[in-house]
Image: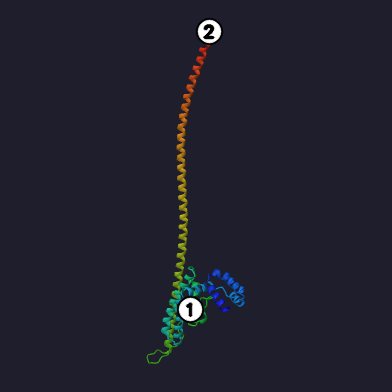
Amino acid sequence: MTDDRVAEAVQQLYAAPLDRFLPLRTELAKDARTSKDREAATAIAALRKPTRPAHALNLLARTAPDAIDDLLQLGQELRSAQRSADGPLLRELGARRRELVAELIGLAVEAADWPDATPAVRDEIGTTLNGALGDDQLATGLRTGTLQRPGSWDGFGPDISPQLTLIRGGADTPGPSVQQDRDRKQRKADRAAEDHRRRGVAARERERVAAAQEADRVGRHKARLASATETLEKARAAEQTATSALDDAQLEITVLEKRLATLKSEMTDHRKLLARAGAAVQKAEREVERIERQGS
């Protein structure tokens, strides 16, 4: 029960996102203690959080297991070729190894959603992949997706070129010194090719980072432009509304001014009528007084 619980916890932890590792480990260890499986709880609590490159490789083992199997099979072929001191085959397998490792590096950073991984990080991942070709323990960690940190192994040398003297019979077979010289030249050429490849990878990485930064800058500029355009449209709409309200108010003022002029004219007419009526009243009053005086 303890072994099964620990094995299950290992798979859960090393497949989980890095920011979930510690809380999940605490939770799993607590569950084991609750179940009174103290041995499992101790083993789970001792599991170490992987580094980010190791985590990327653990995710690679889960997303591209066939590619990992191809790499480890290539390791077996390389060991066999090295044991047989087959220089041409080693060089052929070395080229295949470089191509496959470069492909797996890309898949690993993609699986980890790590597009801005630096060339140094990518080299660290590549070193681990190369190490798994000759280190069985490292290969097991890679295959099972349970690596805690990157590893390396120097068993095949920097370019997996044989450090051997090939001796064959026959009059036309080159002597040891000639073959050694050829091997040294080949190793030098391989190293130069590898250096050139790495410089190319680094240059492409710089270009990719620069392009990503430029795309981010353009994206931010477009977002600011869209926001400013939206603000401008709102301001124009508000201006249109205010203009319409001003026109309505101006029209109402014009109407009221005309009404006021009409009322003033009517008031003038009424005053004239009032004056005439006042004069008529005074005339009538005088006539009444005159008649009264005559009667007395």
Which dot, 1 or 2, sits closer to the camera? Answer: 2
Q: Which residue sits at x=46%, y=64%?
A: 212
Q: Is residue 6 left or right of residue 221?
A: right
The quadrant of the rendering that contains the N terminus is bottom right
Is disc 1 placed on a helix, strand or loop? helix
Q: Quadrant of residue 161?
A: bottom left
Residue 152 appearing in the image? no
Q: Which residue sits at x=49%, y=17%?
A: 280
Q: Amino acid at mark 1?
A: Asn
Q: Which residue sits at x=50%, y=17%?
A: 281
The quadrant of the rendering that contains the C terminus is top right
Q: Which residue is mark 1?
A: 130
Q: Nearer the viewer, residue 187 or 253?
A: 253
> What percent of the width, then of the height, locates residue 111?
48, 71
> What percent of the width, then of the height, locates residue 134?
49, 82
Q: Is residue 236 above or below residue 63?
A: above
First-in-chain label (1 vs 2): 1
Q: Residues within 10 Å of mark 1 (few under 14, many from 20)?
A: many
Is disc 2 placed on a helix, strand or loop? helix
Q: Residues within 10 Å of mark 2 (few under 14, many from 20)?
A: few
Q: Amino acid at mark 2?
A: Gly
Q: Residue furthest bottom?
A: 170
Q: Is residue 217 left or right of residue 39?
A: left
Q: Is residue 85 above or below residue 282?
A: below
> What percent of the width, then of the height, locates residue 181?
43, 85
Residue 252 appearing in the image? yes
Q: Which residue is mark 2?
A: 295
